[in-house]
Image (cartoon, grey):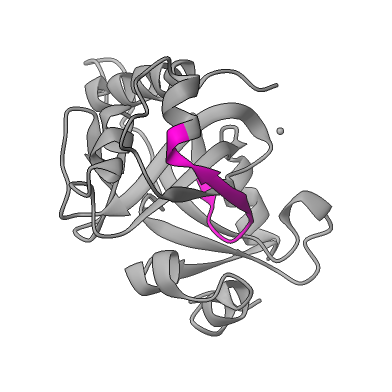
Amino acid sequence: MSSIGFRRLCLIVAAFVLQTAMLRAALPGPDEPAPEAARPSLAGQLLVASPWIGDPRFERAVILIVEDRPDGAVGIVINKPIGEQPLAGVFRALGQNAGGVTGSVRIFAGGPVQPEAGLVVHSADYHRPGTVALTDRLSMTSNVAILQDIGDKKGPAKFLVAFGYAGWGPDQLEREIEAHAWGIAEADPTLVFDEDRDKVWEVARRHSTKHL
């Protein structure tokens, strides 16, 4: 699988989300063979690293898959917090007025790809332009206004702010799962947002639907 302002981070993610939302599967032409049945998408589920994964970047990692298409997959590590960031500091970095802004947000290392890319995973009670539903209980928003709403106590009830992501090329993730590098577990919001981060991997591993 360099750091710049949060505004650019959100623009990067917004472009990605827009492209994703506009994607449509192409129907085969009259002379084209029908495509093979694709495996079910893993979007909205958790990947749980096996104890023998062999990649220190993903040791004991639990990853929420936010996109899974034939040309690749994208996920966010949810159990690697890197510290608290004052909201006022985030607003000042955006060149916005930080007056009256209090509190802080916990920042997570979402993965080794594009650590300047910011993503906000949150509960489904919140929606803005740029919000994408991952499941009926989990969503992701790329609109920078979500931070203002969080600061104004109008944001989602639960949220996770991550920088960077994990990415896989075509068929790469499927091969890794077949090699038992990853297990698959349901993305229960309690596990995503509330569970002690030091225990997330163990809990997710116990609930994995694949043998680890």
Residue, far bottom: 206
Q: Position of residue 42 (x, y in %)?
A: 41, 53
Q: Could you tell me if residue 184 is visible in this image?
A: yes
Q: Residue at x 28, y 36 (%)?
A: 146
Q: Position of residue 193 (x, y in %)?
A: 41, 65
Q: Is residue 172 left or right of residue 14?
A: right
Q: Residue at x 15, y 55 (%)?
A: 125
Q: Could you tell me if residue 186 is visible in this image?
A: no
**Is residue 190 found inside the magenta-colored segment of the image?**
no
Q: Quadrant of residue 182?
A: bottom right
Q: Residue at x 31, y 31 (%)?
A: 34
Q: Main secondary structure of the magenta part?
A: strand
Relative to 49, residue 2 above or below: above
Relative to 102, residue 51 above or below: below
Residue, far front: 99
Which stretch did the figure color magenta? 75-88
**Is residue 78 found inside the magenta-colored segment of the image?**
yes
Q: Position of residue 78 (x, y in %)?
A: 53, 57
Q: Residue at x 38, y 40 (%)?
A: 36
Residue in the foreground of this view, choosing between 137 and 3: 3
Task: Classify the position of the C terminus by image quarter.
Answer: bottom right
Residue in the foreground of this view, choosing between 51 and 89: 89
Q: Position of residue 32 (x, y in %)?
A: 32, 19
